[in-house]
Amino acid sequence: MEKSSDNSEDDIFAETNETVDVEDVDLNSSGAGVSTPAATAAPAPAAEKLEPSAPPAAASAPPAAASAPAAPPASNSSSGGPSKLELPASLAFEYLLTVRVTNPEKIGDGMGAYVAYKVSFSTTIPAFGRPEGSVRRRFSDFLGLYEKLHEKYLRDGFVIPPKPEKSVVGATKIKMSKDSVDEDHFVERRRAQLERFLVRCSDHPVLRMDPDFREFLEHDGDLPKSSGTRALSGAGVMRVFSSIGSSVQRMTYKMDETDQWFEDKNQEVHQLEEHLRRLHSSIEALVNHRREYGCMAEQFAGSANMISSVEENTNLSFAFTKLAETEERVGRLQIEQADSDYYGLAELLHDHLAMLESVRASLYERVRAYKTWKDAEMALTKKREEKVRNELGGKADKAAACEAATRELEGQVERGQEAFDKISATVRSELERYDLRRGYELKTAIVASLEHQLRQQQCVLEAWEAYLPEAKRILAA
Amino acid sequence: MLDELEQHHVDLSDSRQGRTESVDLGNGNDLRVEISDALSEKERVKFTIRTVTSLVPRFARPEFSVIRTHEEFAWLADRLAENVEYAGCVIPPVPPTPDFSSSREKLARLGEGESSMSKEEYDKMKSELEAEYLATFKKTVAMHEVFLRRIAEHPKLREDDIFKVFLEFDKDKDEFFEAQKRFITVFYGHLRSALSEADRMNRHYKATADTYIRVSACASACTKFERDDGLAEFLSSFAEFCERYRKLEGRTASDSDLKLADTLHYYVSDCNSAKDLLYRRARALADFESANKELEKARAKGKAVQKAEADQEAAFNTFNTISEAARAELISFKQRWVAYLHKNLTELAELQIKHSRGQVQLLTQTLERLRQG
């Protein structure tokens, strides 16, 4: 058989003629974990008791979200399902909380139409009124929740999960396959994003206990309208103010960093962003090419069928029909894989790039706390000097006023330092937590992608194996 | 048993015995018609009528053959009978329809009763029936031939245009080439679409494979500053996987290119050549037809007749040679391609299977490794 140009030395599969039977491979190394092909990036945490000093326990996660956009109908798909990676112990919780976003449904017509999603949860957290439930929420509800959490917790240095994007279409260079409906993709992207947002909130030790979050999940009926009025409220104005201010100030204020950990971290975040961006871009390219390949294979199948219809030789005609079938099947499998990698990997990386924004915001809050503290220190020093000057100048009552102000400022400085220390600790623990989280999500997504590929590739193999006898039959009588 | 008799090629050699003399195309013999061959098919009999004549250019060629069924003989007889101009002629009667039904019935009954008689009896009856069948066959051939001969010898009927068409017009041969032309044109169109799509498909496949290099590089880069060793190792394994996977996918893509796209490419070129052949034949036919016209003109004027005759014969020879060769070529073209496609499509499937297995294995190994880390 002719060989295409390859290096025989490293062609370790030159002698391959064994099939690996999927059933034989032990895919359940960590218990009855059932997962779908990478629809959600953030599986729910385990229900183990939290033991900080114990080695990571094997996590058997409850079934993850079942709304996979492209589940391949593999005939010999593993019955036990792919195994889950171990969830780092520090990410696990004593009490369980699972959330899901499903059933996008268009409500109403015309201008007032919107999409409502079913948000369901199941939990063992005592603070929740009931162990399970579901409500209907729309996109603006999610935004509202984000705004509330952002406002409450950012100042203390918490890393808030990224805001669900308003414009999902423009945010990517992904070309959809010709037969897929753009609207379906849009809805699925949004649904998945919303779900990831909620799951990340539920995986955060502080956010998951937040009453607004709980209300979002539990409250039956509509939530009070969020966006419109908020912008004019006192808090809203402050928020706008602070966000504008902070992006300017970030660039201008140089903190005197004494903590090496943070010094390194700032560098890291910068590098991480660069690399994640490149990785994201390469995955997007991969997905695009694969999807194009799949579409072209389907088109080719159409032509092969045409050839078959005019071919006079029966055997040959049949062989072309079968070739068309095979390439069409392969094409479909490739498109499914592209879709799966898109939702599972590309979107995940996109999320993490957004998450890094949150990380930066947290880091900056710490810088602001520092600034506040140091500003207070400087004011104190000045006040003391002023007091001395006044005393020397014989202005006794002004000196007395300074004394009072000094006391005040001393208090501020002390509080400032406390605040700074506190936020430093929070940010540090948040970032460490986030690192672990990112690592876990990335690993899980990559493993899920490979598992999906494995299933697809087995189907491709089957398709070609089915074709071989047809090709051979061309010369049969 | 019936099948043996269904397609019977009559051996007419014994009735040829008296006619091995060279054809003397003297006055009375300027138009000789005979049935040189006959084929009995299930539904009908096909007679091959061979004409030798000196009456060129009334007839396009001095020697030619056509295949006719009984119905066409009947048609000729009807046309002649209807023609008022021949009202005063004795028009040869239409030969009887070939009828093998009684033979067939007997053969069928024999078949049914096969079990109830001894072997010798059966064989004897069978050969008797075969002989009867053969005799019926020869008789019908002879009657059709006599019919034609009488027309050819009749001074008035032989000039008839319909008779000329009956003897000469070979729609089969032309039809063969007409059909070929139609087929190749349509086929060629589809092949070209398939080819261009196969090319694009493979290009994208290759691009997919190559993108893995980028992914690998990015994953590798990420490992360098990862604090978490576990994650760093994970990403490093992943990067390695991408490298190896890329090789496999790359090979699959280029094999698909080689076995599928290249084959189609070659098929398209070959079809092009076949089209050229058909075109050359058509040109030779046109040349021959114009040489014919020139000859008629020359004969009418009485000038340069010999040259015109020579030209016409040369043109005819060219056309005939090309035509016969082309027919054989086109048939062998098809056979060649059936074999070639068989080889390449089989190899395509085998290679795809091999690579798929490799990919499955690599994926399985990598997953094991990643899960452990």
Image: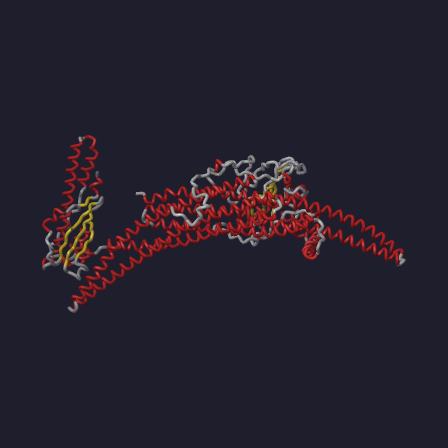
Confirm whether residue A72 shows in the render.
no
**Along the viewing direction, whichever of A179 and B194 lies nearer the viewer:** B194
Residue A459 location, quadrant: top left
Side of A58 where A238 appears, left or right: right
Residue A218 location, quadrant: top right
Q: Residue A35: x, y in percent?
A: 54, 40
Q: Relative to B120, say whether A433 is above or below.
A: below
Residue shown at 86% from the left, 57% from the top: A389
| Image label count | 0
**Quadrant location, the N terminus of chain B:** top left
Q: Residue A215: x, y in percent?
A: 66, 42
Q: Relative to A198, say whether B275 is above or below.
A: below
Side of A226 where A331 appears, left or right: left
Hey, which residue is sitting farthest front in the picture? A9
Side of A210 where A315 appears, left or right: left
Q: Residue B289: x, y in percent?
A: 23, 62
Side of B312 where B88 appears, left or right: left
Residue shown at 16% from the left, 66% from the top: B306
